[in-house]
Amino acid sequence: MQLTRIWFGALVALGYFSTPSLAQIKIGVAEALTGNAAQYGVPIRKGFELAVSEINGSGGVNGQKIELVVEDEQGKKEEAIKNYNTAISKDPNGVTGENARNALKQIEQEKKGF
């Protein structure tokens, strides 16, 4: 749990310092909430929600509350790409998730024409 808090704190700090003028910190979370991988994604989402609840309950990050933008990527690469784009359109400070890195690679390759 301590490692999760450290990692989550680092993610929040990176998002916070990259856009300090926001009144709220948005973090996109794309996890498998349905489908075969839901057994992994649902506890991860609950962990994020618990961390956000504790951080917001303690006054947030430098007074800024954290908001999660949660998307269900169903454990599928295609859904991860779609949800990554959806999360980005909501202007978060950062996006995380099991397939977020793979989705980003796919989007970059599509833009380059590979």
Image (tube, rainbow, N blue to C red):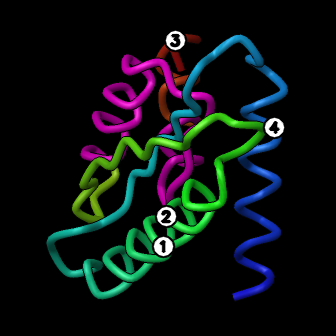
Q: Are marks 2 and 1 in contact (CB under 8 Å)?
A: yes
The earlier-in-sequence mark between 4 and 2 is 4
Identify which amino acid the numbered label 2 is placed on: Ser
The earlier-in-sequence mark between 1 and 4 is 4
The earlier-in-sequence mark between 1 and 3 is 1
Identify which amino acid the numbered label 1 is placed on: Leu
The residue drawn where x is 78% and y is 38% is: 62
Q: Are marks 1 and 3 in contact (CB under 8 Å)?
A: no
Quote the CA–CA distance across marks 3 and 2.
37 Å
19 relative to 51 in the view: left or right: right
Q: Secondary structure at mark 2?
A: helix
In the image, residue 30 lies at what x, y percent? 39, 52
Instruction: Reply above or below: 14 against 46.
Output: above
Residue denoted by label 4: 14
The residue drawn where x is 59% and y is 47% is: 101
Decide whether residue 95 is among the magenta residues.
yes
Identify which amino acid the numbered label 4 is placed on: Leu
The residue drawn where x is 58% and y is 20% is: 23
15 relative to 53 in the view: left or right: right
Residue denoted by label 3: 111
Q: Residue 76 falls in which quadrant of the image?
A: bottom left
In the image, residue 73 lies at what x, y percent? 28, 54
Q: Of the numbered discs in the image, which one, if any, rests on residue 83?
A: none
Residue denoted by label 2: 53
